[in-house]
Amino acid sequence: METTSTGPLIPRRLLGAAFRELRESRGETLQQAAQACLFSPSKLSRIENGLAGEPNPRDVRDLVAHFGVDADRVAELEALAQAGRVPGWWQVPPYDMPSRVDTFISYESTASRIQVYEPAVIPGLLQTRDYAEAALTHLAPWLDADAVALQVDIRMRRQSEHRLRSPRPSTLNVLSEAVLRRGAGHPALMRDQLDALIEASTDPLTELHVLPFSAGLHHAVQLSTTTVFSFDNADDLDVVAIERDRSVQFLEKSDNVRHYRDVIAGLATYWLDEAGSRSFIADIRSTI
């Protein structure tokens, strides 16, 4: 089966946003456009929000015909529809994952910038294989050994796909000091993980900052793992993912995205600069 490295979620959202823009440019209500295309308003709403599943070729043709789209735009919309029918590599066997993880990887694989605030564990894209195995074993005790091994493979594949993307997205990683001091098994495992963090932080596209305990209270103290996914030339597609035990909440409204983007940016008052963060990590490593 054909797969892609990015999956169908973002093409479906872009396609839906394009149809919404066309409808609004004509001054039509959702009900008027739906009636003209013999859709129910709820169906057109799902299409416009990228929630209708695999784009139906007939639906796309009907909408294109109704809006009188020119040939170049038709080709663009049909390309988005086609991309919206092709699964991502993580959506086919042997992979089988909860919808929240599916959605998270869909955003991760297409975002142009990823900002992470992590108070508990090393961010997934920066984990070594041994650390990932230890983290999954302890944080997801309901998984058996085979399931853990499969999840580790997925995590390593995510890292590989991330490195291979062109252009590669930039990342901002803000880690609490607790992340660095929390053991994950044998000391050698943690030393290797901290070495990997230091190496990763030298990549111009991987910005890494430590929030030391000495920073005291700040406005993210009560946050769980929070990721902001941003997309070039499509601010309305930006999304925040807030991770909790066995759940992920995705926030798409612009005011929510703006709030969490500002929260992470505000941490610059408290975090160590990049060179200071590398030194801080090296100092902790020397004590393990």
Image (cartoon, rainbow, N blue to C red):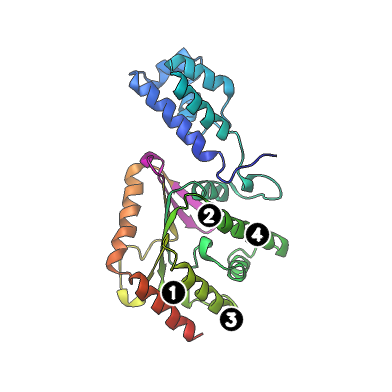
Instruction: List x then y, in percent, for residue 125.
Output: 52, 61
Give the residue displayed 58% in from the left and 81% down from the top.
Answer: 188
**Residues packed near mark 2 inside 10 Å, few (<14), some (14 to 19) or many (20 plus):** some
Mark 2 or 1: in front is 2
Residue occupied by mark 3: 188
Mark 4 or 1: in front is 4
Residue occupied by mark 4: 153
Q: Which residues fall within the magenta stretch?
A: 231-250
Q: CA distance from mark 4 to mark 1?
A: 26 Å
Residue occupied by mark 2: 162
The three-letter code of the residue at mark 1 reads: Ala
Q: CA distance from mark 3 to mark 1?
A: 18 Å
Give the residue displayed 51% in from the left and 14% down from the top.
Answer: 38
**At numbered mark 3, what does the secondary structure look like: helix, strand or loop?**
helix
The three-letter code of the residue at mark 2 reads: His
| Quadrant holding the N terminus | top right
Residue occupied by mark 1: 178
Mark 4 or 3, nearer chain start: 4
Give the residue displayed 41% in from the left and 62% down from the top.
Answer: 204
The three-letter code of the residue at mark 3 reads: Ala
The three-letter code of the residue at mark 4 reads: Asp
Q: Is residue 193 toward the left or the right of residue 239 in the image? A: right
Q: Is residue 199 above or below residue 20?
A: below
Mark 3 or 1, nearer chain start: 1
Asked whether residue 22 is in view, the answer is: yes
Q: Nearer the viewer, residue 222 or 241?
A: 241
**At numbered mark 1, what does the secondary structure look like: helix, strand or loop?**
helix
Q: Is residue 147 magenta?
A: no
Mark 2 or 3, nearer chain start: 2
Q: CA distance from mark 2 to mark 3?
A: 26 Å
